[in-house]
Image: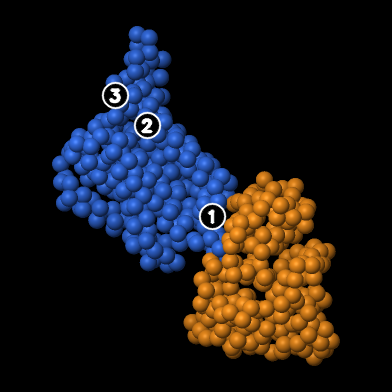
Amino acid sequence: MLQVRDLTTTYGAVHALSDVSFTAPAGKVTAVLGANGAGKTTLLRTISGLVRPRSGQVELDGKPITDTPVETMCRLGLAHVPEGRGVITELTVEENLRLGALGRAQRSGPDELERVYTMFPPLADRRGSPAHVLSGGERQMLVIGRALLSKPKVLLLDEPSLGLAPRVVAQIFALLRRLVEADGLTVVLVEQNARGALSIADVGVVLNLGRLVVDDDASALASDEQLRHAYLGF
Amino acid sequence: MQQFLTTTLTGLTLGMVYAAFALALVLIWRSTRIVNFAQAPMAMLTTYVALTLIEAGYSYWVGFGAALLAGLVLGAVVERVVIRPVEGKAHINAVILTLGLFIVFHSLAAIVFGSRFRSFPAPFGLRGLQVGDRTIALTGFGIFTIVSVLVVMLLLVALFRFTDLGLMMRASAFNQEVARLLGVKVGRMLTLGWALAAVVGSLSGLLIAGGSLVHPSYMDSVVVFGFVAAVLGGLDSPIGSVVGGLLLGVSLSFVSGYLGSDLVALAALMILMVVLLVRPGGLFSHAPARRV
């Protein structure tokens, strides 16, 4: 379970986040929605420690992690897949995956690598290729697979659907749903594609100009016509 | 034929030293986008460490090991103390700091070790080897030069290709943010990168000094050739820096042997210009030209 309390993050004089509080329940998908500039990416970056908040708390399973260095987050079970996919294109597919397995408390065996390859067959065919040859969808598979190798309890995903074909997005979303149901993973999913995100999310929060507008069940958000028109664009 | 062979062998030996120096520059450039102008005086200082020990009666090899170790420590200290505080600011700040270090280390060496020329021993013969009844241009020390640089390069390749540590260092070099998110302690990797680069730099310093004279600015001309070699190979490519070093060494040796040694510096400049015009990213670049 990931809990965010009164989080305020500023860039100079600009308040990117103002007093944001919500809970991402364990074993569920929490969608973070809102227009461009609403503060979604800043929220994830503050949670994972890439950006320090001005005030407020982040707790992972009840333990405060607000002051934890970024480098230690993945050992605590928090994996963050940044926007723009975060594939290290100069490394090979397999090297990217190995890197994911390095950042955890105990080392993983080769079978876990194989498990990722089974989950994403296109990656298995290209394990020795440099990652820059991968397509957008394959890159998304790679970063999710890499994050999974760190054995996270909580997975933060920033815009996984960005620039992908609808069919590929559906595949990725279906896979996330499976991971949540099979492994009990907790997912915080930042999306512009609100309709798609709500279709797989259990709960959702909507941000607007750095403030939390609403925090409710995904189905309730999806059926609130006024909210959809005002903030979600569908 | 005899002259051709001599020129080639001299060039290869010299090229190996340029390659080592270029590799030291590339290792730092690749991970931090900084051209380390202090590389030459750092290598000069560590060579003086070796010389001090050797003159105190220790063997050449004790001095050799101590110089490499001193390079390791000096590289790490420079990164931590001088470069780290300006990390995240414009790269030009760090580059200017390395220029400052260049001057500081020069003066320091002159104060501590004196600025007169001192001769530095070589562990192997400096006479050309005998093949049949002919003497070729390859000396025992030349062979040692080629072998030691090759060994260091193979060790580095093994480190980067086959170890987890090397993987983490490469990840830190290519994408600091993602590396951090994956639990890599990027700061430590950068320190280690500078330390290793300084070791390679120290090696080039020892090899230039071997059987020759040491002076606080004896490494300065190597900066120019090492830098040209690094650009020739593409500043991002360690393999490129080695090939660039060898190409440059052989080309300059031919210029010196057939056209006259006055033209060597000019030829290096010509080569640099031609490479920048024809292939701005260097011979081994696969990325499009980098913005400067």
Q: Residue furthest top?
A: B133
Which residue appears farthest toward the front when viewing the image? Answer: A106
Q: Which residue is mark 3?
A: B125
Q: Amino acid at mark 1?
A: Met
Residue of label 2 = B145
For the residue marked with disc 2, what is the amino acid?
Thr
Residue B4 picture location, percent across and down:
40, 19
Q: Earlier in the sequence, mark 3 or mark 1?
A: 3
Please tell me how crowded label 2 is: few (under 14), some (14-19), or many (20+) other residues with Cα within 10 Å: many
Q: Residue B168 — which label?
A: 1
Residue B27 screen position, x and y as percent: 45, 49
Q: Amino acid at mark 3?
A: Gly
Q: CA distance from mark 2 to mark 1?
A: 30 Å
**SS state under label 2:** helix
Residue B163 at x, y = what percent? 54, 47
Residue B278: give its label: none
Subunit under mark 1: B
Q: Is residue B74 above or below residue B123?
A: below
Bin the neighbour count of mark 1 within 10 Å (Cα to Cα): few under 14, some 14-19, many 20 and up: many
Alpha-carbon span between mark 3 and mark 1:
41 Å
According to the colouring, which chain is blue?
Answer: B
From where the camera sits, is residue B178 visible? Answer: no
Q: In the picture provided, is A17 more to the left or to the right than A167?
A: left
Residue drawn 26% across the image and 41% down it: B50
Q: Is residue A10 left or right of residue B3?
A: right
Whether residue B126 is situated above or below residue A126 in the rendered picture:
above
Looking at the image, residue A12 sits to the left or right of residue A117; the answer is left
Q: Quadrant of residue B201?
A: top left
Q: Residue at x 82, y 84 (%)?
A: A219
Front position in the image: A140 or A105:
A105
